[in-house]
Amino acid sequence: METTAFKFRELGSALSFQGRCLRLMRLVLGDDEMFWVVTPADAARLERLGYELVG
């Protein structure tokens, strides 16, 4: 399984990127203290693993 996560240091940058995506994307607080913008399927998998969804 390949996961693509777009990572941002600042929440504002992640939200701005998420808003410009053509597909629905979710925001997750990563274990590297960065905000990850990922697909809904990846967000669900990450949430089951204990990651926190933002918003």
Image: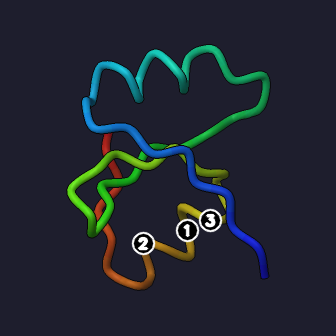
Picture quadrant of residue 3: bottom right
Q: Which mark is residue 53?
A: none
Q: Give the percent coordinates (x, y) of residue 41.
A: 68, 63
Q: Amino acid at mark 1?
A: Ala
- Say which quadrant the C terminus sits in: top left
Q: Nearer the viewer, residue 52 or 33?
A: 33
Picture quadrant of residue 10: top left
Q: Give the percent coordinates (x, y) of residue 25.
A: 62, 39
Q: Residues within 10 Å of mark 3 (few under 14, many from 20)?
A: some
- Alpha carbon distance from label 1 to label 3: 5 Å
Q: Amino acid at mark 3?
A: Asp
| Residues at circles 2 and 1 in contact by the CB criterion of under 8 Å | yes
- Alpha carbon distance from label 2 to label 3: 8 Å
Q: Amino acid at mark 2?
A: Glu
Q: Against 18, is 37 above or below?
A: below
- Residue pictured at 29% horizontal, 62% vertical: 52
> Which residue position holds label 1?
44
- Residue pictured at 31% horizontal, 45% vertical: 54
- Say which quadrant the N terminus sits in: bottom right
> Which residue position holds label 3?
42
Q: Residue furthest left?
A: 33
Under circle 1, the secondary element is: helix
State the scheme by which the image is colored.
rainbow
- Residue pictured at 41% horizontal, 85% vertical: 49
- Residue pictured at 56% horizontal, 17% vertical: 19
Q: Give the percent coordinates (x, y) of residue 31.
A: 27, 69
Under circle 2, the secondary element is: helix
Left or right placement of residue 50 versus residue 17 in this view: left
> Which residue position holds label 2?
47
Q: Against 18, is 32 above or below?
A: below
- Alpha carbon distance from label 2 to label 1: 5 Å
